[in-house]
Amino acid sequence: MGERDAAPAPGPDQTDVGRIFRQESGRSVAALIRLFGDIDIAEDAVQEAFTVALAKWPGDGLPPNPGGWITTTARNRAIDRLRRETRGRELLREAAVLSPCDEDPGGPEVTGSVPDDRLRLIFTCCHPALSVEAQVALTLRLLCGLSTKEIARSFLVAEQTMAVRLVRAKRKIKAARIPYRVPADHELPDRLRPVLAVVYLVYTTGLDAPAEPGLCPEAIRLARILATLMPDEPEVASLLTLLLLTESRRASRTRPDGTLVLLADQDRARWDRALITEGQGIIRSCINRNEPGPYQLQAAINAVHADAPTAEQTDWPQILTLYNQLLAMAPTPVVALNRAIAVAEVHGPAAGLALVEELDIDNYHRFHATRADLLRRLGRSTEAAAAYQQAAELAPTDAERDFLKHGGRGARGSFDAP
C-alpha cells in the first residue's frame, strides 16, 4: 500500500484533549486575562474553546500548535460574547484588541501568551490579600486547569463549597484591585515566598492524598514554569530540586497492597534515577551561587539521602549539619522535629527524644510517631504503644493509620517526607 492509500492517523480522543487542556489552559487563561483584565471572561472563553476542540480535533486531527489554536479560539469567543453586551463593548474598547482578533481560528495561530503572562497570573493567585487556601485553590484552577470537583476532592469539601470559595476569591481580586503583574524588584523577595509555598503545598497535598496523584506532577510542572521564567532566583530552582528528589521516591513509599514503607526500608532500586540526576545537577549549581535558602537546604538534605546506596550508608552527620542551618533560618517546630530525628541517628535515641519532648506540636501525627519510634528504641514499650495510638488517631491517610496502629510494624526510622 502506497502513502496515498495509507489511512489517516486517528485524531486525539477525549483523554488526549484533556491532557492538552491541563498543559495549555493556564497559558491561555493567563493570556486572556492580560487582554481583557477579567478572570471569569478568560476562564469561560478557554472552557468554550476546549469544548470546540473536543468536537473538532477527533475528526480533523490536532492543529500544528494546539495551545495557539486554543488561545485564538478562546479570544475570538470572548470577543463575540463581549460585542453582545454593553459593558462588554466598553471593555473591548479599553482592551483595544478588536483588530487583530478577527482571523479564522482555524487559520494562522497566535501563540499570544508571552511567558510573563503565567508569571503574572501565579503572583495574582498568590497575592497576600488572599488566604492560603484561596491561593492554592485558584492556582490549581487557573494555572493547572483542575476542575472545581477535583479541587474540592483535594480539600475534602463538597464541590459546591469549593465553587463558592473560588467565586469569592475571584471577587476579592476584583474588589481589592489586586494587580495582574509581577511585583517590582524590591517587592519580589516577600512576594515570592507565598508563591513557592503554594507550589510546595500543592505537591504535599498530592503526596498525602493517594486519590489525587495528579497534584504531584502538576506542582512539578508549576515549579518548572517558575524556574524557566525566573532563572536567577536560586530558591525557585531549589524548590524544583526538592520536588524532583521527593518525586523520585514516590513509587517506593507504599507496597502493592497500599501499606506504608518508611524511608529506611524503601527499595532504592525503585527510585527514579533520572529525576535524582536532574535534581542533583540543579542543586549543585544553586549551592555554587552561595545564596542558601530554606528550599535549598531541604533540597540538599534530600540529595544526601539520594546519594546513599543503602540506608545504613546515609551521611547523617551531614544531614544534621544541614538541619542546623535550616533551623537557624526557618525555626519552625516541624524543622525542629526533623532535626531531632537526625540528632537521634548521630547521637542516639535518648538525645533525639530529649529534643522531641521540648516541642509543642501535639496535633501533628509525625510528632507522636517520631516520639513512639524513639521510645521503642529505648525499650520503653508501654509509652511507645500509647504514642503510636495517638499518632494513628491523627494520621491523615489510611496507609499511615494502619502502619501506626500496628506499632510501626517493627520498622525503624522516619516517614518519607519532603
Image (cartoon, rainbow, N blue to C red):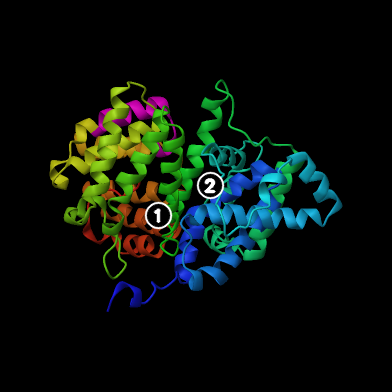
Which is more toward the observer, 169 or 79?
79
Disc 1: which residue: 207
Which residue is painted at 33% across and 31% down in the image? 297
- Say if the magenta span includes residue 406: no
Corner quadrant of residue 411: bottom left
Q: Secondary structure at mark 1?
A: helix
Which residue is painted at 21% across and 39% down in the image? 345
Q: Quadrant of the N terminus?
A: bottom left
Which residue is painted at 73% across and 47% down in the image? 171
Q: Quadrant of the C terminus?
A: top left
Q: Secondary structure at mark 2?
A: loop
Determine crowd level at label 1: few under 14, some 14-19, many 20+ residues with C-alpha closer than 10 A: many
Q: Which residues are magenta?
A: 319-335
Across and down, in percent, residue 126 comes to 58, 40
Q: Horizontally, is 383 left or right of 77 in the view? A: left
Across and down, in percent, residue 405 comes to 34, 63
Q: Earlier in the sequence, mark 1 or mark 2?
A: 2
Across and down, in percent, residue 330 comes to 43, 29
Question: What is the distance, in whole Å, between disc 1 and disc 2 at their CAs?
Answer: 33 Å
User: Do the residues bearing badges 1 and 2 touch, measured as CB atoms within 8 Å?
Assistant: no
Which residue is painted at 55% across and 56% down in the image? 69
Q: Which amino acid type is shown beneath numbered disc 2?
A: Thr
